[in-house]
Image: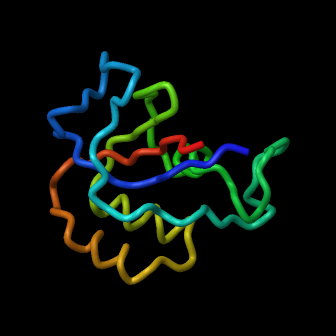
Amino acid sequence: MMFVDVYVGRSDDPMFKWYGGDYNGNIPKRITPVFPNVRRRPEDLHTGSPYSWNNTSWHTACKDFGLELVQLDWGAFGAKISKSQVLDLLERFVPTISDELLSCLQKLEEGVEYALIIAETG
């Protein structure tokens, strides 16, 4: 079973490149806590989805939300995202989030482009 961490990083992290980066560690430093698992209703799942209702793919959720994911690393994908999009994404796909995560997200700056990262952890 593959596990992933989903979080927000700074898209201007000097150790990170959107395109043409080294496929060994090309992800921005995490600036938020890790997001909880996606929660979807059974009728929202795509036909043939290998994911259960309790652990639906963040890749699919991002696609459904309209984010364009790009491969950044051997085991990481990312999308450019704003603060308001992050909050909307979580409202749509995660019914409850921790106070720690919400507090951190509220401190993100408006008008700044962030990186939503989906990275394999094992």
Residue 95 to residue 10: above or below: below
Residue 119 to residue 35: above or below: above
Q: Which of 30/116 is in front?
A: 30
> Residue 56: x and y, percent?
69, 55
Write down the quadrant of residue 78 in the picture: top left
Indicate the quadrant containing the C terminus: top left, top right, bottom left or bottom right.
top right
Residue occupying image coordinates x 64% and y 49%: 57
So how many labels did they put on this image? Answer: 0
Farthest residue in the right direction?
Answer: 48
Write down the quadrant of residue 20 in the picture: top left
Indicate the quadrant containing the N terminus: top left, top right, bottom left or bottom right.
top right
> Residue 16: x and y, percent?
24, 32
> Residue 54: x and y, percent?
73, 65
> Residue 98: x and y, percent?
44, 80
Farthest residue in the bottom direction?
Answer: 99
Farthest residue in the front direction?
Answer: 122
Residue occupying image coordinates x 32% and y 42%: 80
Residue 25 to residue 96: above or below: above
Q: Is residue 98 left or right of residue 43?
A: left
Q: Which of 42/105 is in front?
A: 105
Residue occupying image coordinates x 79% and y 61%: 43
Residue occupying image coordinates x 48% and y 77%: 97
Q: Is residue 84 left or right of residue 75?
A: left
